[in-house]
């Protein structure tokens, strides 16, 4: 029985109607331009939310485009590759676009300008692959979720649960970001092919592509590609109303199925596999052409950019080159953001490299950014509650976190916060709620680690105590025995006689009377 | 190129506390004008007086607490408190009623509890209840709606009443003041009169008190505007009004001769003003939607109980303060279910 997913739409609580500003970068003709080769590339070794990978290249090594830099035997890894051909000049810690602002290990590569491909392993007859082979190839191609969460795709595919629907997420709901919209217009066939590959190999009977209401052009191009691929029975395009953060995986699942992903679980536990459209296109490239994930469509936009547009750019390129390609900054540029205006990361410099998570480079003008107005106390207005898609009480959470009352957070489910920023945006007191929630989550994690440590220590201590006590009692018992042995040899006879007498007396008593 | 950074989100905030308060004040204008129309210039006089005291006290308290007063004075929260208080007291009450009310509202209920956002009790209602208990005489000297009045105090006479506490001859309090419809209703019921007999009094209008019902209409209009602007959520007003109707409807249906029609309950006294403007005070209310519903239900229950069995003709102020006490408890038991938690 198939669930008629997408036939009826549901809703999620809260959310924001935002101006989307997507047209700003979408005035160009397709296909979008490709950024020219850069002289130097800086490729962070870990670009996903999985485990660390092992580097397999060395300084001074010449590599071809597509050569793997790391191998990832681990289930949660995702490899990185040479974005072009050239020489590895260094492997060292460099600043990377990351929340922590810390440096991270990077492979630094000098391009030789030839852009020569390494030998690839195309597999146009994907039908012959087994699921395990598919997953191995996806991992080797370094594919991660390109919607921004950069979760290793292979890990998502490796579940054992039965998947009944593949959901392709094209509902790019954050303002300004248009890379998926462009992709769906420019290369819909790749998305369809990727979906077919996943469905075929993982035996998924149906797939839906979720796009937002105003994406008329995408619907047309996708429908055409579905028709050309003869996949009408398999893939369906579903329009969902435009409401931020609908493109969030959990919210999209809720809108399409009316169900919630259980806390701590994945959509997989509902029989759903959710993939971003760009991720699926990358899977198609990786399987059919053997191409690893080296580049992506990036939206470079905002009032702080002279000529906003979308482009294909390789990972490791300095962000400044993308901006230069768009004519540079306008004089009003105030903030540079990787990602969207609600969940994006403010960058301190444009010399940082482009990474797999970089769906958008947003230059906000001084008029666009929040002027730093002083914070008011929370007035409990409840605006935050009414927009929270996770059903939380942001005002209570922030009070508890501020007073460091972390034990009170448990019934409030801070962990369900998706950091969408809706509450923060509507707060009339201008409390940096998301910042507090990030801090609170960090602290909770730290507490959990500490607790684990202390439990371990306590267990060890208790075990030791038990052991000591046991030794003590044993020793005492031994002593006792020896004493008895010494004293008892004399009156053994009498004690035996007494015992016999006792037993006799007991027998003569009426039954049950001694209870 | 280097850039300054900050945490997400990066959009300018949608609104600000002072804008919220300003909208509440705007929404009070129609009702206030209606009240001035029916009860004279004294209404505006009390509002101005209370605002002046409130701002002075707010400034003084912030100074005492070592906070920069500029910002807080511009958040309009003290002004809102002052206006709500002033709308509750008789238009010709002496000036010191306002002063004492504001001392308890602003200095004690607000700042001694930690200032905006930290107060437990609704400041305007604390101020009102204190003067109501301490000065019952002054607080019952309500004026009749101008159309029913035998003698209408002029502006000058109103000023004299407010600032010197006496009325120039030939006016006197007995001639000028009149019991409110709720007083009349309560007295009548206590004398075992039938509702139809009580309603003979010209003080009653079509369904509430004469004049009062129009004031309530205009406050409701402002309240609906706030709802539409989403400055307040519907939960508290709807819970209050629905509870009042559901509880008084059966009694009225059972015996309309001794039980007033539900609309009479709603359109007299401070119920509409309270439902939209007082019980919706966010700081001292409940956090979650369910909590707000329970809060409103409680306010309505207590208000009705006081009206029926208590010593005061109207009980909204007490009801709000009592529910303020329960708000933290309600909050504790109405935490909404988070996404992904078992239903
Ligand atoms: S929106 Fe801001 S001020 Fe309002 S309740 Fe939430 S945290 Fe408090
Ligand atoms: S950031 Fe967290 S708490 Fe705030 S609205 Fe989003 S999910 Fe809710």
Image (spheres, coloured by chain):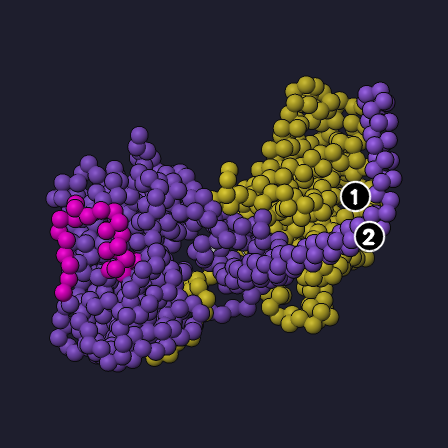
Chain colours: A purple, B yellow
Which residue: 26% across, 64% down?
Answer: A298
Q: Image check: B176 left or right of B21?
A: right
B47 left or right of A121 in image: right
Q: What secondary structure is found at the residue carrying circle 2?
A: helix
Residue at mark 1 to residue at mark 2: CA–CA distance: 101 Å
Q: Position of residue B115 (x, y in %)?
A: 68, 61
Q: Quadrant of residue B306?
A: top right
The x, y position of residue B125, in whole percent, is 71, 49
| B55 and A278: which is toward the camera | A278
Q: Is residue A261 visible?
A: yes
Is A125 magenta? The answer is yes
Q: Say whether residue B216 is magenta.
A: no
- What chain is tagged by disc 2? A
Left or right side of B195 for B191: right
Residue located beneath label 2 in the image: A486
Residue at 69% across / 72% down in the picture? B66
Mark whose residue sits in front, 1 or 2: 2
The residue wearing badge 1 is: B140
Magenta stretch in the rendered image: A119-147
Ligand 1 positioned in quadrant: bottom right
């Amino acid at each position: 029985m198939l669930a008629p997913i997408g036939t009826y739409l549901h809703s999620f609580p809260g959310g924001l109607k935002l101006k989307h500003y997507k047209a700003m970068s979408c005035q160009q003709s397709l296909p979008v331009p490709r950024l020219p080769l850069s002289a130097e590339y800086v490729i962070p070794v870990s670009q996903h939310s999985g485990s660390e990978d092992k580097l397999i290249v060395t300084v001074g090594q010449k590599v071809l485009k597509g050569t793997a830099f790391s191998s990832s035997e681990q289930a949660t890894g995702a490899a990185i590759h040479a974005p072009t051909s050239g020489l590895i000049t260094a492997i060292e810690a460099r600043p990377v676009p990351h929340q922590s602002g810390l440096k991270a290990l990077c492979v630094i590569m000098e391009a030789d300008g030839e852009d020569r491909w390494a030998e690839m392993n195309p597999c146009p007859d994907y039908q012959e692959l087994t699921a395990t082979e598919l997953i191995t190839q996806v991992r080797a191609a370094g594919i991660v979720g390109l919607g921004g969460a950069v979760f290793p795709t292979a890990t998502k595919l490796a579940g054992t649960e039965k998947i009944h629907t593949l959901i392709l997420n094209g509902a790019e709901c954050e303002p300004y970001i248009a890379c998926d919209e462009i992709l769906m217009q420019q290369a819909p066939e790749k998305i369809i092919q990727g979906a077919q590959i996943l469905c075929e190999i993982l035996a998924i009977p149906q797939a839906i592509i979720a796009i937002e209401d105003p994406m008329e052009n995408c619907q047309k191009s996708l429908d055409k590609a579905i028709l050309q691929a003869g996949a009408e029975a398999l893939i369906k395009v579903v329009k969902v109303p435009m409401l931020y953060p609908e493109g969030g995986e959990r919210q999209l699942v809720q809108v399409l199925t009316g169900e919630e992903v259980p806390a701590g679980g994945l959509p997989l536990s509902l029989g759903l596999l959710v993939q971003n459209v760009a991720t699926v296109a990358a899977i198609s490239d990786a399987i059919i052409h053997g191409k690893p994930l080296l580049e992506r469509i990036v939206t470079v936009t905002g009032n702080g950019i002279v000529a906003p547009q979308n482009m294909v750019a390789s990972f490791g390129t300095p962000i400044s080159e993308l901006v230069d390609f768009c004519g540079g900054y306008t004089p009003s540029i105030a903030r540079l953001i990787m990602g969207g205006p609600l969940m994006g990361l403010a960058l301190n410099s444009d010399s940082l490299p482009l990474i797999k998570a970089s769906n958008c480079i947003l230059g906000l003008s001084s008029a666009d950014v929040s002027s730093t107005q002083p914070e008011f106390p929370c007035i409990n207005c409840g605006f935050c509650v009414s927009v929270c898609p996770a059903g939380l009480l942001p005002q209570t959470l922030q009070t508890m976190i501020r007073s460091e009352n972390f034990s009170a957070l448990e019934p409030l489910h801070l962990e369900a916060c998706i950091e969408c920023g809706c509450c923060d945006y509507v707060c009339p007191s201008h409390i940096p709620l998301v910042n507090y929630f990030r801090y609170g989550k960090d602290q909770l994690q730290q507490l959990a680690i500490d607790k684990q440590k202390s439990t371990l220590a306590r267990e060890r201590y208790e075990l030791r105590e038990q052991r000591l006590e046991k030794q003590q009692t044993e020793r005492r018992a031994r002593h006792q025995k020896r004493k008895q042995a010494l004293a008892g040899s004399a009156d053994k006879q009498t004690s035996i006689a007494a015992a016999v007498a006792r037993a006799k007396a007991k027998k003569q008593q009426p039954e049950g009377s001694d209870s | 190129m280097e850039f300054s950074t900050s945490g997400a989100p990066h959009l300018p905030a949608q609104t600000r506390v002072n804008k919220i308060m300003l909208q509440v004040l705007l929404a009070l204008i129609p009702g206030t004008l209606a009240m001035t129309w029916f009860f004279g210039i004294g209404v505006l006089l009390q509002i101005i007086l209370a605002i002046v005291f409130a701002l002075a006290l707010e400034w003084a308290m912030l100074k005492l607490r070592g906070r920069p007063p500029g910002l807080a004075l511009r958040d309009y929260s003290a002004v809102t408190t002052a206006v709500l208080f002033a709308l509750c007291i008789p238009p010709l009450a002496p000036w010191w009623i306002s002063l004492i009310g504001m001392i308890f509202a602003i200095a004690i209920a607000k700042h001694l509890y930690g200032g905006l956002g930290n107060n437990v009790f609704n400041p305007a209602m604390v101020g009102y209840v204190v003067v109501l208990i301490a000065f019952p005489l002054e607080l019952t000297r309500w004026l009749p709606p101008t159309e029913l009045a035998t003698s209408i105090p002029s502006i000058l006479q109103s000023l004299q009443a407010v600032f010197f506490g006496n009325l120039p001859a030939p006016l006197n309090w007995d001639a000028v003041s009149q019991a409110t419809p709720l007083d009349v209703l309560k007295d009548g019921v206590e004398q075992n009169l039938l509702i139809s007999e009580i309603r003979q009094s010209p003080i009653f209008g079509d369904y509430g008190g004469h004049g009062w019902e129009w004031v309530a209409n205009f406050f409701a209009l402002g309240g609906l505007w706030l709802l539409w602007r989403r400055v307040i959520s519907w939960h508290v007003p709807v819970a209050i009004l629905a509870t009042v109707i559901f509880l008084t409807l059966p009694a009225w249906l059972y015996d309309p001769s001794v039980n007033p029609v539900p609309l009479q309950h709603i359109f007299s006294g401070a119920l509409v003003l309270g439902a939209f403007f007082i019980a919706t005070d966010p700081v001292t209310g409940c956090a979650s939607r369910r909590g707000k519903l329970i809060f409103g239900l409680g306010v309505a229950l207590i208000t009705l109980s006081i009206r029926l069995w208590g010593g005061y003709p109207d009980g909204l102020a007490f009801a709000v303060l009592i529910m303020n006490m329960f708000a933290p408890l309600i909050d504790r038991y109405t935490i909404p279910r988070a996404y992904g938690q078992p239903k």
